[in-house]
Amino acid sequence: MSITLSDQDQLTLRIAAWGAVSLMSAAGAAGSAHKAATNGSIALTSATGLVGHILAKAPKGVRYGKTVAELADQVLPALTASITLLKQHAPDEAGNFRRTVTVAIDAAVQSQAGEPSPTMTDMARKITEALDAA
């Protein structure tokens, strides 16, 4: 059975996942924001299933704002909304999405030399809480 999500639903998933990588990159700015973004992006584009097809490309034309707070205001609710809509339309893919975003977070954290900073650890916690809020 083929599951099709609306363009808006797909955009929500892209904003959530790619935005989570952007949040981790911003939180890792003291180390290597570029490595965090690169490793997180590789994790997203390595996803499989419906989620993999949707996350294969980053959202285009989305304005996240000028601060990390503005970015978080969009991304954290989108993470919760993504899990909720996947549970409704493609229940098997909800776990896939959560695992994919979690792997991207872990990849971003591991891109840093040594232990992750408290800032990255806290951002990862916020992202995980948003995923679990659905």
Image (tube, helix red, strand yellow):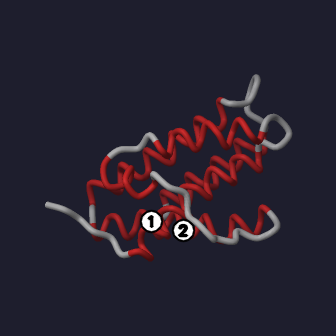
- Residue 17 point in image, percent of width and height: 53, 56
Quadrant into which the N terminus falls: bottom left
- Residue 59 point in image, percent of width and height: 56, 64
Which residue, as the protein is rendered here, is positioned at the far left? 1
**Residue density around tag 1, few if under 14, some if 14–19, many if 20 or more, within 10 Å:** many
Residue at which label 2 appears: 78
- Residue 6 point in image, percent of width and height: 36, 75
Residue type for callout 1? Ser
Residue type for callout 2? Ala
Label at residue 126: none
Which residue, as the protein is rendered here, is positioned at the far right? 30
Q: CA distance from mark 2 to mark 1?
A: 6 Å
Q: Is residue 22 left or right of residue 113?
A: left
Q: Is residue 103 left or right of residue 126?
A: left
Q: Residue at x 42, y 63 (%)?
A: 83
Label at residue 82: 1
Quadrant into which the C terminus falls: bottom left
| Dots 2, 1 in contact, CB < 8 A | yes
Secondary structure of the residue carrying tag 1 is helix
Q: Residue at x 41, y 52 (%)?
A: 97
Where residue 33 sits, quadrant-wise, is top right
- Residue 32 point in image, percent of width and height: 79, 36
Whether 28 is drawn above or below 84: the answer is: above
Secondary structure of the residue carrying tag 2 is helix
Whether 83 is drawn above or below 51: the answer is: below
Closest to the observer, 34 or 80: 34
Q: Residue at x 69, y 64 (%)?
A: 72
Whether 75 is drawn above or below 95: the answer is: below
**Residue density around tag 2, few if under 14, some if 14–19, many if 20 or more, within 10 Å:** many
Q: Residue at x 55, y 57 (%)?
A: 58
